[in-house]
Amino acid sequence: MPILSNVRLISVFCLGLVPQILLPGSALGDAAATGTYLNHLNDGAPPTVVDVVVVGGGFSGLMSAYDLDQAGLKTVVLEAKEVIGGRSRSITRQSGPGIVELGATWINNITQPKVFALTEMFGLETAEQFTHGDSIVQGEDGRVLRFPPGVPVSTDNETLAELEGLLYALIDEAAEEVDIHDFEFPAEQDVTLDHWVGQHDLWQHQHVRTMMSGLTTALLGREPHEIGAHYFLDYVKSGQGLVSLSSEGEFGAQSLKIKQGTTSIATNLADSLTLGSVRINTPVSSVTQHNDTVLVMAETGETFRAKKVIIAIPTNTYSDITFSPALPCDKTALASQTKPGVYAKLIVNYAEPWWRNAGLSGKVTSAAGPVSFGWETSDLALSQYSLAIFIAGDKAARWHELPEGEKGDAIIEHLASLVGDELADEARNVLELNYVEWTLEEYMWGAPTNSMGPGLLRKYGAALREPFEDVHFGGGETAYEWKGYLEGAVTAGQRAAKEVIEALNT
């Protein structure tokens, strides 16, 4: 039986653009039936009059809408896709009970208080990330190592381990000096990240180049030569350091999973709004400002008249909207030069947690590819045994080019080689496989966030969040803390809503 015989994928073409992979069983299905999400077509009606239009139904846009609604402002959210939640994508498992997380997955109750507060407000359950057992690491030479619990995932070569220590110390110390609220940075260091590491006499080491590629692609979906040193250090500082960003446990970014799925936060926010406030399948085509009024036109032909607008979509998609008057040059420069991450995520489901039985934690890292890294995402109470596999950067770009029928096979075969001959057959015995190629997702074109090249953050960082007359800007990229994470999206949405509420109350 072919490995992918149980894969449930639907290929569709959206508006004649790049084909994307959509998965059935969306956790939003029941919520959509309540009527909160209205799929409007053009009926020649006059403009819908509201106080605020929020463009984008991801976490940031929905958080803005929630705060605006709570403040008594009539608000409508216009989401281009057929689902809400942005880069969160929780679907129901087909081979049994449980949620499959194809997008954002983890939160932290200590370091990410805003998003955790939402789980408590909506009565959602969290579970600690499983960390017991050995981790698997594959080096650039293809050699596979196992590291027991409590031992830093690294290398068994003392010289290479010393290089890693020097690199991580360099990054953490430099990031600590960055002020995430002020965008000053030494011009001579405002270079690509590979050049910056070279300034510190480390880039000549192949192992350092491999480690940097693993870091930047995991965090941003881009290679070191594509990212500005200032932006990367700012990103690391925003996530409280490399240890925080790369670890599990009490203070790690991969600390807690939401049993109902991360998208349940988005659906709960939407369900808390006035009925009919969220419109799906409603991409915005133009935003026109005139005499303290903003007219928003959707591709469906609908128009909305508002006092304020919040743009809560990725900066790389600003160009999909015609702004009149045009956006300021600073914002245009950012929108045209930010880079969405090259990213894909797969969830591989099994009938048994065979890795646990073999003393493995399910955590894997590979410098060889196509697998970049992964964690276990099981729910034992539901007999759901799954591994989350991420593919990022150049590895993802190469994997995207494989024929559709070979993509899943390539990942399963690599996973089989990582766990060794004794467990290879277990790795191949897949119950269900689901994936999203975020690089091909229309209206986003990448994950987990956008990144900037050298000079951009220093020159335009302040402009990223500045309102343009009656148009305000949210979205996870505009967060000061936890850029690229749900916490950042939530706080950015709250900030944008606060700006609008204060402006309309003066």
Image: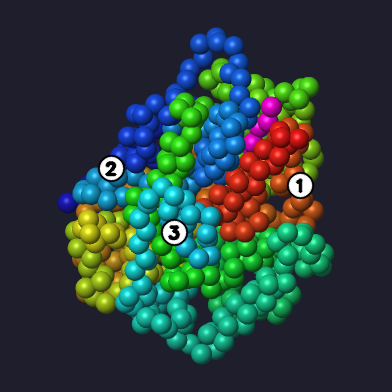
Decide which of tag 2 and tag 3 comes sooner along the chain: 2
Q: Kindly indicate whether the residue at mark 1 contacts the one at mark 3 (C-beta within 8 angstroms).
A: no
Decide which of tag 2 and tag 1 comes sooner along the chain: 2
- Mark linked to residue 463: 1
Q: CA distance from mark 2 to mark 1?
A: 43 Å
Q: Nearer the viewer, residue 25 or 491?
A: 491
**Residue at point 42%, 29% (across, down):** 36
Quadrant in which residue 275 is drawn:
top left
What quarter of the picture does the C terminus occupy?
top right
Query: Which span is picked out in magenta?
Result: 307-311
**Residue at point 64%, 21% (across, down):** 305
Label 3 Cα neighbours within 10 Å, binned few <14 / some 14-19 / many ≥20: many
**Residue at point 59%, 70% (across, down):** 241
Q: CA distance from mark 2 to mark 3?
A: 24 Å
- Mark linked to residue 106: 3
Left or right position of 174 against 257: right
**Residue at point 22%, 56% (across, down):** 382
Q: Which residue is mark 2?
A: 8
Percent position (x, y) of residue 456?
Answer: 74, 53
Left or right position of 338 against 164: right
